[in-house]
Amino acid sequence: MSVEFLQNKSILVTGGTGSFGQFFVRTMLQKSLARRIIIFSRDELKQSQMATTLPDPAERLRFFIGDIRDLSRLERAFHGVDYVVHAAALKQVPALEYNPFEAVQTNIIGTQNVISAAIDQQVKKVLFVSTDKAANPANLYGATKLCAERLMIAGNAYAGGTGASLSVVRYGNVFGSRGSIVKVIADQRASGEVTLTHEDMTRFWITLDQGTALVLSALERMHGGEIF
């Protein structure tokens, strides 16, 4: 994967304490010459735990506690940032069916806040990490992600002369990520009974390595308006 384009850049990851965010940040620390890497998330415990497991945390790494629902906090966090990888989201399908407006607040309104803050702070590139469930969505999670994608693409029209470019990358279920079915099956195996959503259910798998490589490729190639 190419990381040369990140040299001397400041990059921020929303939802940076999630499975993807932690792996992505670790890759940036190990392989890139990024000037500054910022984790933006709302869980101070996960940030503290993450700080103790990453290399050279004091030199290039910064932690911002905040919620993408809070526009003013995003504007503060985005000041001086070159690239934003927007991975923060509510993702658990059954939970979002039961708490639908919470999904709207984070996945849709939160994404619009990211767009507005990035344009106002003149961030050069914003890449939204979306999902294959946004294609012909069958549940609320996919529908909110599809809506967020449309907002992200439309954001290019509002960016005007600020120089901000906004794009989307989609991928499938991350193998072994927190809350994924792999962990559920591993936990259920001891009982001798494994439950399935539906016998005809299809899932598209991607590893954390592949997800990080895909995001980096899209971030490097994007010009604004693409869905990778």
Image: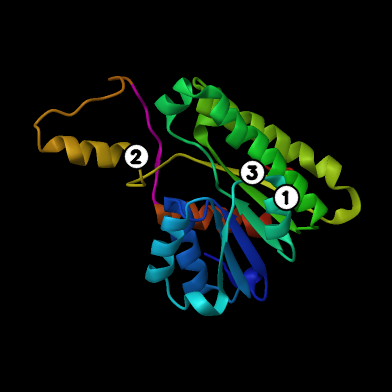
Q: Is residue 182 left or right of residue 58?
A: left
Residue nearer the viewer, 74 or 115: 74
Residue that appears at 75% across and 58% down: 123
Residue 161 in view, yes or no: yes
The mark tally for this picture is 3
Q: CA distance from mark 2 to mark 3?
A: 22 Å
Nearer mark to the viewer, of 2 and 3:
2
Classify 102 as above or below 63: above
Q: Is residue 217 left or right of residue 172?
A: right
Q: Which residues are magenta?
A: 201-207
The location of residue 47, given as percent across then percent down, is 46, 60
Q: Residue at x 47, y 66 (%)?
A: 27
Q: Nearer the viewer, mark 3 or mark 1?
A: 1
Q: Amino acid at mark 1?
A: Ser
Q: Is residue 135 visible?
A: no
User: In the structure shown, which secondary structural element does the residue marked by tag 1 occupy?
Assistant: helix
Q: Residue at x 9, y 33 (%)?
A: 191
Give the farthest residue toward the right.
Answer: 161
Instruction: Name the residue carrying label 1.
Output: 72
Magenta-colored stretch includes residue 204: yes
Quarter of image, res 38: bottom right
Residue 168 bears which disc, if any? 3
Give the residue number, with chain letter if any, for mark 2.
180
Callout 3: 10 Å neighbours few (<14), some, many (20+)?
many
Residue 174, compared with residue 21, is above or below; it is above
Secondary element type, mark 3? strand
Q: Earlier in the sequence, mark 3 or mark 1?
A: 1
For the residue carrying disc 1, how many other residues have a C-alpha within 10 Å: few (<14), some (14-19), or many (20+)?
Answer: some
Q: Which callout, 2 or 1, points at the residue further toward the start of the chain? A: 1
Q: Main secondary structure of the magenta part?
A: loop
